[in-house]
Amino acid sequence: MTPHPWAGLAQAIEDEVDEARARYPNQGNPNLLALHAEVGELTNAILNLHPASGLASHPQHVRNAKAELVQVMAMCVRLYEEGDTTLALPPLKRAT
């Protein structure tokens, strides 16, 4: 059976969530603010891939963009599962 095309991405997200939880356990974490910051970093990384940036052909910039994308997705998972205690936002998985 052929693995799902997103299998590697899903594993990278899971690994990033685990690492982030180890570094920043859910003890008053501003998950929404962290997501906002990560989206900004992803935006910058993607803009570096634009041909006009002069950086698009550098493999490191592609790796950076991929890493930032995984970090954004990991923060989405944390918001979904944990919410944001600093804003009294409950986990979105419990919302109806």
Image (tube, rainbow, N blue to C red):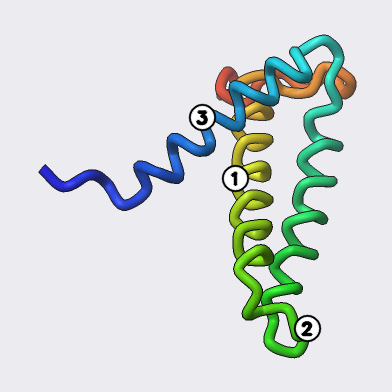
- Inspect the image, locate mark 1, and give the three-letter code of the amino acid beneath it: Val
Where residue 1 appears, as percent x and y from the top left, is 10, 42
Residue for point 68% across, 66% down: 61
- Do the residues bearing badges 1 and 3 touch, measured as CB atoms within 8 Å? no
- Inspect the image, locate mark 2, and give the three-letter code of the amino acid beneath it: Ser
Q: Reading the chain from its start, which is encountered first: label 1 or label 2?
A: 2
Question: On the image, which quarter does residue 66 sit in?
Answer: bottom right
Q: Reading the chain from its start, which is encountered first: label 1 or label 3?
A: 3
Q: Which mark is residue 70?
A: 1
Where residue 43 appears, as percent x and y from the top left, is 76, 63
Left or right of 1: which side holds 15? right
Residue for point 76% across, 19% down: 23
- Inspect the image, locate mark 3, and give the three-letter code of the amino acid beneath it: Glu
Residue occupying the far bottom of the picture: 52
Residue for point 68% across, 75% down: 49
Residue labelled with disc 2: 53
Left or right of 66: which side holds 86? right
User: Which image quarter is the C terminus in?
Assistant: top right
Determine the CA span between mark 2 and mark 3.
Answer: 31 Å
Question: On the image, which quarter does residue 84 sit in?
Answer: top right
Determine the CA span between mark 1 and mark 3.
Answer: 9 Å
Q: Categorize mark 1 by other alpha carbons within 10 Å: few (<14), some (14-19), many (20+).
A: many
Left or right of 5: which side holds 23? right
Q: Reading the chain from its start, which is encountered first: label 2 or label 3?
A: 3
Is disc 1 placed on a helix, strand or loop?
helix
Residue labelled with disc 3: 14
Badge nearest the viewer, 1 or 2: 2
